[in-house]
Amino acid sequence: MRPRTVIVLLAGVIIGALVTTPLYLTPASPSKSITVFAGAAAAPVYSEAAELFKNKYGVKVELRLGGSGSVLSAMKIAKTGDLYIPGSPEYLLEAAKSNIIDISSVKKLTYLVPAIIVQKGNPHNIRSLEDLTRPGLRVGIADPSSVCVGLYAKELLEKNGLWESVKSNIVVNAQSCEATAALIPTGAVDVIIGWHVFEDWYPDKAERIWVEPSKVPKIGYIAGAVSVFAEDKALAGKFLDFLASEDVAEIWAKYGYYASEQEARQHAPNAAIEDLT
Amino acid sequence: MKPLRVIAFSCLIFLSLFIVTIIASSSLFTSPSALASAILSDEIIFAISLTLFTATISTAGALALAIPAAYALAQANFPGKSIVDTFIDIPIALPPVALGTALLIFFTNTPLGVFINNSVIKFVFELPGIILAQFTVVSVLAVRLLKPVFESIDPRYVMIARTLGDSELRAFFRVTLPLAKGGLLGAAVLTWARALGEFGATVTLAGATRFKTETLSIAMFLSLAVADLEKAMAIILILLALTVATLLVTRRLFYRRSMI
């Protein structure tokens, strides 16, 4: 390649970058806006809901996404943010303890049912929780001491008297919800106990086996709360209510989440739903 | 063959294969169609241009400071030099997330930082935050890379230029810089490549907001977080293509004098 060609190429890159600058340097819209610190797993739902909210009420919603714990750290340090929506509710307790959120503003947005998740086509022919005790099967769960879905998995096994016999098959304790779900498409394990929605995260690679409804002791959920740093608490609360409204129920459903308790109850009629307070 | 040669070449071959294999395996989770649709999506086009833009500015800023700083470290002796030298190494050893957290604390919890963030440039959760985060990570790296370049230049050339009537400054631009050209370029490319993939400090200071602070590495992080493995791997391949293209082009251009 001749030096001249290279210079032209480099110049092209630089000019390209400069020309597209307006794309990302457009000033923030002068109208009202709220900032949401959210766990990234349900981000597609929040993004669509934010778009809908902007069209309906003219309020811009800015999402700052990441691990539930890391975005909480960012809120604590920067003392900012209007809403906090972690992937699982124990982070709300944590946030309440550090006086980041108002616990009375906690609102449940969507419900999650624990389920068995296997590779597409169910190559190990797993039909029930009991099958997880089969010798040689590689089972993965989230870390029960730190990740919500891991605690639910452990409780599910314990309540059905299977914890001791499945324990020896557990080869990994994943450190987040997403990491647990990824164990199936990457083929790291044969089976996991996760949320029902994991199948919708990897429709081509994962398959869900429902646990017999009477055996599910507890249903999980995603909830959000208004932050103490919110300048317009009413507006922040409005978006939180909006996420739990009929308007957004369709979006939740599109991504496989249950927006109402009744829907989740089909798969776990007797399950408890733990409140934070 | 002699034993040393066998060991040396085996290690080289092992390292090359190791890198090629792990990189090639990331293509397992993507497909040409996923790659194409990723490259053509607004989100990735935005991320590519934001990444090129921020990495170029942060590298330029880093070099502007690192060239004189490395020159000072290499050529001059002054009291406390070894302490300064050690301080400059600290950010290299720290995880970028720690640097980002320190920056975030500075701009939101100290009077000077809050003043700068509120009245001069807004860094926290904004685009300039990306540039500053990259700058923090790569500027010290640039100093580290440039110091041996200046050390390798024989001071006698400068002395001769001085005896022929050049001022110190003129000798630096006429003798030292041209002699350092290959090394400078190598350092610049590596610095830019490092800025291109910076993640930890960026995500902490500038946050992960789609279409705002979404560089390629943040786009990859967000894709992993929503369990979109195909897109995440497509982004890795894009980053890889950018890096390889830059390294190849620079190597060709400055083949003979190159230190890269």
Image (cartoon, grey):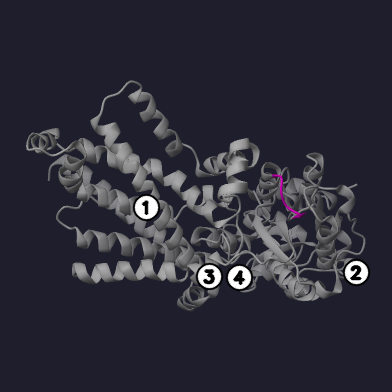
Q: Which residue is mark 2?
A: A262
Residue type, mark 1 in image: Ala
Residue A106 is left or right of residue B94, and the answer is right
Residue at figure coordinates x 69%, y 70% from the top left: A200
Of circles 1 and 2, the one toward us is 1
Which mark is drawn over residue B199? Answer: none
Looking at the rendered structure, the secondary structure element under dot 3 is helix
Residue B143 is left or right of residue A248, and the answer is left
Task: Report if residue A77 is visible in the image.
Answer: yes
Q: Main secondary structure of the magenta part?
A: loop
Whichever of callouts 3 and 2 sits on the residue coming sooner in the sequence is 3
Residue A98 is left or right of residue B254, and the answer is right
Do discs 3 and 2 belong to a common subunit?
A: yes
C-alpha gap between disc 1 and disc 4: 44 Å
Residue at figure coordinates x 43%, y 66% from the top left: B237
User: Which chain contains the residue that carries disc 2?
Assistant: A
- Sort mark 1 into few (<14), some (14-19) or many (20+) by Cα contacts within 10 Å: some
Residue type, mark 3 in image: Leu
Residue type, mark 2 in image: Gln
Of circles 1 and 4, the one toward us is 1
Residue B145 is left or right of residue B99, and the answer is left
Which mark is drawn over residue B60? Answer: 1
C-alpha gap between disc 1 and disc 2: 58 Å
C-alpha gap between disc 4 and disc 2: 28 Å
Looking at the rendered structure, the secondary structure element under dot 4 is loop
Looking at the rendered structure, the secondary structure element under dot 1 is helix
Q: Which of these two is toward me, B247 or A252?
A: B247
Q: Which residue is mark 3?
A: A23
